[in-house]
């Protein structure tokens, strides 16, 4: 009897200890670049998507940082808006979707999930790939085009200077705040997010979002170890 009680207590204690490091999911979202022919219509000083990989390389570097510093049990999922890379790849005759898919092959801790619509992204945030179960989101970061009201996944990809796929702040009411941990870290690396979107995000999810007051800067990132910068006069704000 004593041995049975000890075994039961041991199993209970080990089970409780294993739960002390809860599995969580850290989401990185990459929007897509403009197609080259639309960028060529802009004046040289206004062109910002000359390189197709702005929102890919920065996301990859950030995921490496997260993998090194996140708590044990953190799963990194990378959601990428596919159609923009299909269009840009066709215009440049490059296999860009294959280039994106090479990232998780080189960094197996990354799980790549393509999405093609706002509804697909919202569903993943709320439920994960097949029902997240008890696993919550401990982080969310966005790399891509944005304005003060929206993440724009395909800005100048299908229509010049316009987006046809976006996450507007009015869409945030569809998010489940129960999908996030109470201290989830959220940041947008797009332009103008702190001017309105961040507040709507906080109302919808209960978590603060760091965003830019003003524009972000994806130029000359090789001089900043592939980190996103801020344009003159801009600043990061946590709201």
Image: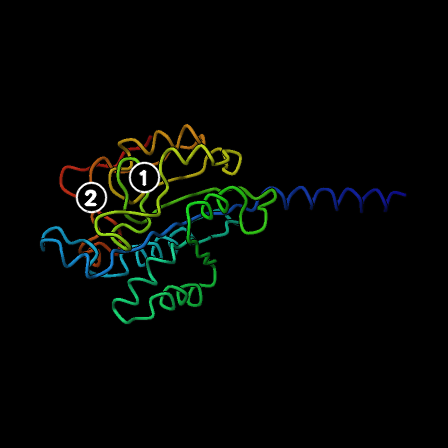
Q: In the rendered image, which quarter is residue 60 located in?
A: bottom left
- Quarter holding the C terminus? top left
Q: Which mark is residue 230?
A: 2
Horizontal and vertical percent position of residue 157: 27, 55
Horizontal and vertical percent position of residue 147: 26, 39
Question: What residue appears at the point 31 percent right and 59 percent down from the top-left corner?
Answer: 57
In this figure, which residue is indicated by the disc labeled 1? 150
| 208 and 163: which is toward the camera | 163
- Badge 1 marks a residue whose secondary structure is strand
Front: mark 2 or 1: 1
| 66 and 139: which is toward the camera | 139
Horizontal and vertical percent position of residue 2: 87, 43
Q: Is residue 14 left or right of residue 107?
A: right
Horizontal and vertical percent position of residue 181: 50, 36
Measured along the vertical axis of the image, is residue 53 above or below residue 149?
below
Which mark sits nearer the N-terminus, 2 or 1?
1
Question: What residue appears at the point 47 percent right and 48 percent down from the top-left corner?
Answer: 120
Using a 10 Å C-alpha cutoff, classify the residue at mark 2 as few (fewer than 14 neighbours), some (14 to 19) or many (20 or more): some
Q: Which mark is residue 58?
A: none
Q: Say if mark 2 contacts mark 1, CB within 8 Å.
A: no
Question: What residue appears at the point 20 percent right and 44 percent down from the top-left corner?
Answer: 230
């Amino acid at each position: 009897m004593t041995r049975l009680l000890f075994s039961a207590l041991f199993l209970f204690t080990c089970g409780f200890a294993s739960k002390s490091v809860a599995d969580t999911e850290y989401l990185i979202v990459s929007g897509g670049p403009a197609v080259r022919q639309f960028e060529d219509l802009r004046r040289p000083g206004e062109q910002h998507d000359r390189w197709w990989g702005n929102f890919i390389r920065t996301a990859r570097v950030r995921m490496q940082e997260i993998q090194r510093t996140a708590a044990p049990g953190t799963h990194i999922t990378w959601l990428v808006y596919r159609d923009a890379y299909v269009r840009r790849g066709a215009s440049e005759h490059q296999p860009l979707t294959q280039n994106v898919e090479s990232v998780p092959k080189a960094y197996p801790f990354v799980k790549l999930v393509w999405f093609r619509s706002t509804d697909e992204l919202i569903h993943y945030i709320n439920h994960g790939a097949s029902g997240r179960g008890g696993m919550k989101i401990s982080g969310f970061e966005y790399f891509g085009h944005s304005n003060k009201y929206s993440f724009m996944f395909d800005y100048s990809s299908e229509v010049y200077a316009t987006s046809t796929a976006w996450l507007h702040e009015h869409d945030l009411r569809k998010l489940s705040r129960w999908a996030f941990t109470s201290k989830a870290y959220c940041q947008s690396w797009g332009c103008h997010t702190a001017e309105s979107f961040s507040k709507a995000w906080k109302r919808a999810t209960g978590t603060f979002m760091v965003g830019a007051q003003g524009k972000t800067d994806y130029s000359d990132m090789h001089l900043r170890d592939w980190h996103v910068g801020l344009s003159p006069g801009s600043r990061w704000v946590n709201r």
